[in-house]
């Protein structure tokens, strides 16, 4: 059974503490979006399999925003190292806003201080939303240094994000689809392979979200 690296801890405010890796625990594979990418072994005789998986951990409530869990699964028998492709922070920590017809979806990672919001703030006044500041539109920033993660054979790297809407003032999570892309670099032996992955968030008429 795969093991899971859990990067989450309870956060009392929007200022997140530094990402800390907890103890390794047993976990099963959850249902949700799953895509596979394959890397050749150094000797050319085998295959290494890297998978992305995502799911909605919690829908939004009056107490907290919706939360999605993003995972990278190493289902090979070899240890690999992963890092974001061409950018800072740890894998899947910094996600460009997902674009839709009526605004954007912001993913904000729990349990770290490597990603922050600039020129804006997170608000809950009947809607979990990103509010622009006085100097233009809000945006997410990240540290410039990448943070590689070692992923043991048949293990899972997992990180959770709070979900916020960014759009017109009188609109809150309008029904529709929002899409974005992330990329990781997988390193094994002397091989480096960039693997892109697309995320799609669908907002239902009632405001619930699905991720694929």
Image (cartoon, grey):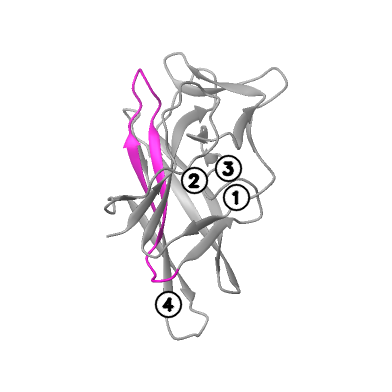
Q: Which residue is mark 3?
A: 96
The one of 210 and 8 positioned closer to us in this rendering: 8
| SS under mark 1 | loop
Give the distance between the C-alpha atoms of the residues marked 4 and 1, in whole angstroms. Answer: 25 Å
The one of 159 and 140 positioned closer to us in this rendering: 159
Give the distance between the C-alpha atoms of the residues marked 4 and 2, in whole angstroms. Answer: 30 Å
Within 10 Å of disc 1 (Cα), the crowding (few <14, some 14-19, many 20+) is: some
- Ranked by sequence position, the earlier of labels 1 and 2 is 1
Tell me the residue at 62%/22% (across/down): 120
Specify the quadrant that holds the N terminus: bottom left
Q: Which residue is mark 2?
A: 179
The residue segment tinted magenta is: 53-78
Give the distance between the C-alpha atoms of the residues marked 1 and 2, in whole angstroms. Answer: 25 Å
Q: Which residue is mark 1?
A: 147
Q: Position of residue 198 (x, y in %)?
A: 48, 53
Q: Which residue is mark 4?
A: 47
Within 10 Å of disc 2 (Cα), the crowding (few <14, some 14-19, many 20+) is: some
């Amino acid at each position: 059974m795969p093991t899971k690296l859990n990067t989450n801890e309870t956060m009392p405010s929007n200022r997140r503490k530094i990402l800390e890796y907890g103890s390794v625990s047993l976990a099963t594979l959850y249902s949700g979006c799953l895509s596979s990418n394959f890397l050749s072994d150094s000797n050319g005789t085998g295959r290494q399999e890297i998978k992305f998986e995502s799911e909605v951990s919690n829908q939004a409530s009056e107490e907290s925003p919706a939360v999605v869990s993003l995972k990278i699964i190493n289902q090979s028998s070899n240890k690999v190292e992963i890092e974001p492709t061409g950018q800072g922070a740890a894998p899947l920590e910094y996600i460009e806003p997902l674009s839709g017809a009526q605004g954007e979806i912001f993913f904000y990672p729990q349990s770290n201080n490597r990603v922050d919001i600039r020129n804006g703030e997170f608000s809950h006044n009947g809607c979990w939303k990103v509010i622009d500041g006085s100097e233009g539109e809000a945006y997410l920033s990240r540290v410039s240094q990448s943070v590689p993660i070692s992923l043991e054979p048949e293990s899972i790297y997992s990180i959770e994000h709070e979900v916020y809407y960014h759009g017109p003032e009188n609109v809150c999570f309008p029904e529709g689809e929002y899409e974005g892309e992330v990329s990781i670099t997988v390193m094994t032996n002397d091989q480096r392979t960039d693997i892109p992955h697309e995320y799609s968030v669908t907002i239902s008429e009632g405001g619930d979200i699905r991720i694929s």
